[in-house]
Amino acid sequence: MADQLTKRTQDYAQWYNDLVLKADLAEHSDVRGCMVIKPHGYAIWEKMQSALDGMFKATGHVNAYFPLFIPKSYLAKEASHVEGFAKECAVVTHYRLKSDPVHGVIVDPDAKLEEELIIRPTSETIIWNTYRGWIKSYRDLPLLINQWANVVRWEMRTRLFLRTAEFLWQEGHTAHATKQEAEEETRRMLDVYARFAEEWMAIPVIKGVKTASERFAGAEDTYCIEAMMQDGKALQAGTSHFLGQNFAKAFDVMFTNKENKQELVWATSWGVSTRLVGALIMTHSDDNGLVLPPKLAPIQVAIVPIAKNGEQLMAIGEYLEPTIQALRAKGISVKFDNDDQKKPGWKFAEYELKGAPVRIAVGPRDMENGTVEVARRDTLEKQVMQMTDLAEKVEHLLQAIQENLFQKALAMRERFTRAVNSYDEFKTAIEEGGFLLAHWDGTAETETRIKEETKATIRCIPLEGDTTPGACMVTGRPSKQRVVFARAY
Amino acid sequence: MADQLTKRTQDYAQWYNDLVLKADLAEHSDVRGCMVIKPHGYAIWEKMQSALDGMFKATGHVNAYFPLFIPKSYLAKEASHVEGFAKECAVVTHYRLKSDPVHGVIVDPDAKLEEELIIRPTSETIIWNTYRGWIKSYRDLPLLINQWANVVRWEMRTRLFLRTAEFLWQEGHTAHATKQEAEEETRRMLDVYARFAEEWMAIPVIKGVKTASERFAGAEDTYCIEAMMQDGKALQAGTSHFLGQNFAKAFDVMFTNKENKQELVWATSWGVSTRLVGALIMTHSDDNGLVLPPKLAPIQVAIVPIAKNGEQLMAIGEYLEPTIQALRAKGISVKFDNDDQKKPGWKFAEYELKGAPVRIAVGPRDMENGTVEVARRDTLEKQVMQMTDLAEKVEHLLQAIQENLFQKALAMRERFTRAVNSYDEFKTAIEEGGFLLAHWDGTAETETRIKEETKATIRCIPLEGDTTPGACMVTGRPSKQRVVFARAY
């Protein structure tokens, strides 16, 4: 229960791990680096999927499904792509087991694949190999396709949700006739991600472009949304890549344009993953447990009856029935917890730990008074409410909680974001965490030096805000604008 | 287009393959045995998922996610399970690639796994290994969990949707305190599948139990739903397994019962896959293309304006706008196809090929008369309808099409189902296809002999219908009831 959670101030990383386990979100499996997403964690992911899928479809995208396996030679076709992923590829080499009298079940040496198959770490190569057959003419463009899938990147150090060998994600892969259209798509999907983060996850994000060294392997430009966690560290919450014609070149994907000439196709790709569940936890939760924005909470309203016997329990059920019906009619998920094996106090702690945004408690006294006790998870405040229009009041409260979580996260980010003007100031400030806005000369050398000396990376070159030029805090050379530095997950 | 489809009477298998490709449902990928599910095919699967997921949740199940990888030793823990799957396992042996000056990108021999990982062919072993940590007491039971996932079974001969190396599916894995509860769950989910097949897919199914030789590897009993395709062959459309305590034994999953004693847990598992898309196609479609039951059709109503110019097109749009709004308000998906680059005739053929249940055509004459032309895909009949209450009329038509498809499939199944009383009669009848109801002595020997001599298998021992005992058509020995024989996919 919650009282066993490590406090955030004591050990933030341990708090996070405790919380993921105790709130029944996920656990490590016996398979190295892979997690089991438990029902409560998966229910949050389902809500995220549903919202994102709706946003993708509203922007003209359709879903499809491509193979899990990528022939090794495909991955190798785009040079920087394979370089970026080679070190974390799970490789299938055989397709059969057999019984061995001495060793039991063994891999059948006679069933070796001619060409090894890679478990997709991302699907650009297999998809662009497929697109070659689908795209002949400008009439076939744009192709706006998304895939919900599992991918594998063999990570040596893993953390639940944040970094696992296998994870779930969506990957959009679009094909366009012109550079401009592809660039617009890249930015459109970045905006979709930013809107999802802010409106659904209640997480304020900075939209920006990555430096060359932080780009996706095979991209011309990588855009990202960056969020600040409660420990002041940054978390990349989504990326959208302008891939230029790199994959069209590698897989020979040409189209006949309106002038009847052959041209290479332009590409984008974009993705978010179960990592977002980690971001959600680290942004809002507290020492009592999970705090979930109402729009993504599997149970939005938990109702705990306080009854001495079955008769009272029944009466409370009847008392609340119209409210429960009214809430459900509004699409609000309600759990009326009438399990008489568990005490109300235990239930209170449980729903606090699991992050139900609103908890309603009702006892015999409440029924006499025509009231209920309503507790909100974000502020832990309780208030007595009259039964009149209770469903409407709860609906408004859920909206208020959603908004409050965003404002709270925004205020925190603003408190821990500051401009620094010298490298000395930077070195001191970075120890306190948060986002530092500083001038940088645009070179990989300086970026690497800062990273090595301070463990801070350039999270992004922000697309909005102050774009005044200046001088690099390290080298004094010209800088086009301040960039965002932070230590990151 | 449709005129390039092979006719069913000419070559049913070729017709199926043509149709899957031409209706843009799926295609073979370059990766052996793996298919690409194209947007139109995936949209049907999404509709299936959504309906099934709702039915699973309504019966108390929740979703979760378990690792793609299964350590080889886990798979080996349940003897008959590994025996059943060993021959079709994709095996991961390495976790890194590297650059080689001579051979380019190679598998890094230094990155060999200590224990090989199997890509899940099904997840009983990894899940029951996990359940060991989740189940301590009778209070933790039942555990009612479902997973939507991809699985891999290395098949040598593959067919789009029907048999592919990688496929998408759902797998339910439940844990119970008593045998009776587990058996009830097995039957409950069989009923869910049967209801889904009949009410959503419009496919009549026979519910039954498999013979020992056709059981799932590791099950005590395998229940199934069997459907008849238009060529008279059977297709197993879903299975629900009573696993007894086999996996609890293999993975040491015990619980403390109410009497404070340790007991082994009882298990079920059940699944349906993208194979259902194949069943859907083969049950209803015709020589003109796809025929989809309205409840699973991505586009339920396709509207084709017949306009000579932009002005007419605009007028038709305005004419239909209230109807389109009214249809959408009823949750009916409508495509108003105003693409002026394509001719109406081309569009008619296209929507016929892609299986839109209702097509509405409107030209200037219709506007003068206050009518539209409505064509139904199942019967290819056209009728002129007045605009008054058009949305209601179309809604009823969709319901009528759904019902007609079911009745048509049912009539076909009844026509091609018959009781046979001698093995000679059986041998002649099986050449004509269909389901044969015959007496069998209950032995594996006789079952094998029939299979070898006629290529017919026992699809199931039906749970409903005639249970009169008799004498085996082959050996004359006693038979408890007639069983269903057929050649099968």
Image (cartoon, coloured by chain):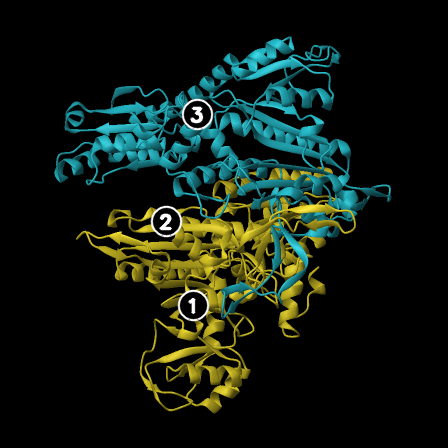
Chain colours: A yellow, B cyan
| Residue identified by numbered label 1 | A80
Percent of width and height locating residue B398: 38, 25
First reached walking from the N terminus: tag 1 or tag 2: 2
Percent of width and height locating residue A135: 31, 49
Query: Image check: B104 left or right of A281?
Result: left
How many residues crowd around disc 1 within 10 Å: few (fewer than 14), some, or many (20 or more)? some
| Residue identified by numbered label 2 | A61
| Residue identified by numbered label 3 | B12
Query: Image check: A117 left or right of A223?
Result: right
Quadrant where the C terminus of chain B lies? top right
How many residues crowd around disc 3 within 10 Å: few (fewer than 14), some, or many (20 or more)? some
Numbered tag placed on residue A485 in the rendering: none
Residue at (47, 29) in percent of width and height: B280
Disc 3 is attached to a residue of which chain?
B
Asked if the residues shown at circle 1 and circle 2 are in contact, with their CB atoms under 8 angstroms apart, the answer is no
Percent of width and height locating residue B254: 80, 46
Most foreground residue, B399 or A477: A477
Disc number lying in front (3 or 2) = 3
Give the amino acid at mark 2.
His
Query: Image check: B349 left or right of A312?
Result: left
Q: Work out whether B19 lies above or below A68.
A: above
Asked if the residues shown at circle 1 and circle 3 are in contact, with their CB atoms under 8 angstroms apart, the answer is no
Q: What element carries label 3?
A: helix
